[in-house]
Image (cartoon, rainbow, N blue to C red):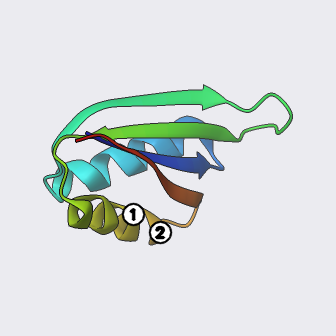
Amino acid sequence: MQTIYAKLEKGMDSFVRVSNTLRRKEFEISGMNLQAIPSKSGSHEMHIYLNGTNPMTANRAMRQLAKLVDVNSIQLIKEEV
């Protein structure tokens, strides 16, 4: 399993955009987590849990997220074998 972290600027609108993009590109997602950032109004942190251990899968997902306007600070934070 691989975990991707991303910061979203527009809350639920961004969440829907991210989930639809990953679904259209047929990534195997085992879960998503969205939390508000208390210090910033409207900003949220998102964790995306991808199935599999192929590093190319996470890199491809991160490239897709980087194309979205209101998504930034994209990082691969955890890889489990």
At label 1, the amino acid type is: Met
- Horizontal relation, residue 8 to residue 43: left or right: left
Residue lying at the far front of the rendered structure: 81
Label disc, if present, on residue 51 of the rendered structure: none
Q: Position of residue 60 (x, y in %)?
A: 28, 68
- Image quadrant where one finds the N terminus: top left
Question: Which of 16/25 is in front?
Answer: 25
- Image quadrant where one finds the C terminus: top left
- Residue neighbourhood size for the residue with mark 2, other residues' Cα within 10 Å, grouped as few (<14), some (14–19), many (≥20): some
CB within 8 Å, label 2 to label 1? yes
Question: Which of 58/42 is in front?
Answer: 58
Q: Position of residue 70 (x, y in %)?
A: 59, 59
Q: Position of residue 34 (x, y in %)?
A: 52, 30
Indicate whether 58 appears above or below 53: below
The residue under the point 52% across, 39% down is 46
Which secondary structure, mark 2?
A: helix
At label 2, the amino acid type is: Ala
Which residue is label 2 attached to? Answer: 66
Indicate whether 17 appears above or below 48: below
Which residue is label 1 attached to? Answer: 62
The label nearer to you, 2 versus 1, is 1
Residue lying at the far right of the rendered structure: 39
The residue under the point 20% across, 48% down is 23
